[in-house]
Amino acid sequence: MLRPATPNDVAAIEAIVEAAYSPYIERIGRKPGPMLEDYGRRVEGGGVHVLDNDGQIQGFIILQDTDSALLLDNLAVAPQAQGLGLGRVLMDFAERQAIDAGYSAIRLYTNEAMTENLALYTRRGYVETHRAEEQGLRRVYMGKPL
């Protein structure tokens, strides 16, 4: 069900990004960071995994190695598949990947206007570490010890 993304998955990833992040445009006042990514390049670079259900991509996650922790760079679930626990599956996968890679922590960031995400990550044990404005986006950085 969860596998590394291939170039054939890029269109599905882009469609999920469009559907999942478009509702935030009005709240943020511009496109969120994930809508500005080059997913073809990200897939080529590795670290992108998709949730594949019988050939239908229902979600994806992008993980990135850093010096001190695994970065959960992006996670999205197709709107029609939300509420099925797939976000939890992806977050559990990220935390297992971090542990398997020898990290003692996992980090992520989200836009401060994405209050639903902040609440979700807090429930999962993530703690805010700092806030920053980058490329005109107000981000909240969070971490979780593993």
Image (tube, rainbow, N blue to C red):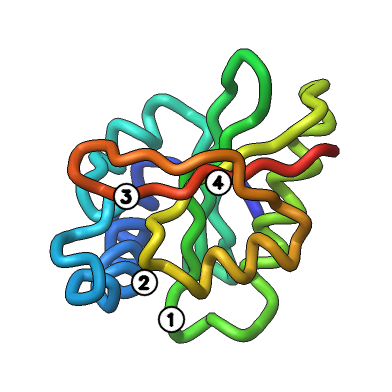
140 versus 21 height, above or below? above
Disc number for residue 128:
none
Query: Which type of secondary structure does the marked residue at label 3 adopt?
Result: strand
Q: Earlier in the sequence, mark 1 or mark 4?
A: 4
Give the number of the mark in front: 3 or 2.
Answer: 3
Q: Earlier in the sequence, mark 1 or mark 3?
A: 1
Mark 3 surroundings: few (<14), some (14-19) or many (≥20) residues within 10 A? some
Give the number of the mark in front: 4 or 2.
Answer: 2
Q: Residue furthest top?
A: 67
Query: Picture quarter containing residue 104?
Result: top right
Are the residues flagged by discs 3 and 2 in contact, CB closer than 8 Å? no
Disc number for residue 138:
3
126 versus 117 height, above or below? above
| Percent x, y of residue 39 | 30, 43
Q: CA distance from mark 2 to mark 1?
A: 6 Å
| Percent x, y of residue 65 | 58, 23
Q: Quadrant of the N terminus?
A: bottom right
| Percent x, y of residue 25 | 20, 70
Q: Which residue is mark 1?
A: 79
Q: Which residue is mark 4?
A: 49
Give the left or right position of residue 10, taking residue 6 as reference: left
Give the number of the mark in front: 1 or 3.
Answer: 3
Q: Earlier in the sequence, mark 4 or mark 2?
A: 2
Query: Which type of secondary structure does the marked residue at label 1 adopt?
Result: helix
Task: Name the residue type under label 2.
Answer: Ala
| Percent x, y of residue 57 | 48, 65
**Between 99 and 120, the one nearer to me in the picture:** 120
Q: CA distance from mark 4 to mark 3?
A: 26 Å
Q: Which residue is mark 2?
A: 20
Q: Residue at x 37, y 29 (%)?
A: 44
Q: Is residue 66 visible?
A: yes
